Amino acid sequence: MVTLVTSPAMREKLTTKHRVQEQEIEECFLEHEGKYLVDTREEHNTDPPTMWFIGRTYRGRLLKIIFVHRDGNIYIKSAYEPTEAVIRIYKELNNSEE
């Protein structure tokens, strides 16, 4: 598996604001079977592109994982519990690209 990189500031935000542990993010990547989607919103436009997916932790918690893949590493931009609308969008986009 590639290296997951989380900055100290992001680590703080994940734990205090979203109550997400880095281990949960790793579990979501390890368990993920679908596609990674590109965040096409203009305010999130990055080079390389910002990607996201919804994953499940070993304990069954759903998380939206947002990241950038660069230089062989995955840089975590955020992770939090998705809304029902985001889950629906993910399912629709993930199935439409098959």
Image (cartoon, rainbow, N blue to C red):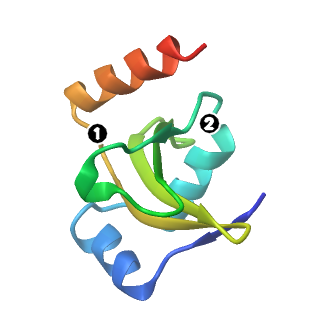
**Looking at the figure, which quarter contains the N terminus?**
bottom right
Identify the residue under disc 1: 82
* Marked residue nearer the N-terminal end (2 or 1): 2
Q: Quadrant of residue 36?
A: top right
Identify the residue under disc 2: 32
Dot 1 falls on a residue whose secondary structure is loop
Which is nearer the eye, 10 or 22? Answer: 10
Q: Is residue 67 above or below residue 92?
A: below
**Looking at the figure, which quarter contains the C terminus?**
top right
69 on left or right of 43: right
Q: Is residue 58 above or below residue 44?
A: above
Alpha-carbon neighbours of circle 1 within 10 Å: few (<14), some, or many (≥20)? some
Alpha-carbon neighbours of circle 2 within 10 Å: few (<14), some, or many (≥20)? some
Q: Give how far across and how far down residue 8 sits, in percent.
A: 42, 87
Q: Is residue 2 above or below residue 85?
A: below
Q: Give how far across and how far down residue 89 sits, in percent.
A: 31, 24
Kind of residue indicated by mark 1: Pro
Q: Give how far across and how far down residue 96 sits, in percent.
A: 48, 12
- In three-dimensional space, the C-alpha distance between marks 2 and 1, rounded to whole angstroms, equals 15 Å
Q: Is residue 58 above or below residue 74?
A: above
98 on left or right of 95: right
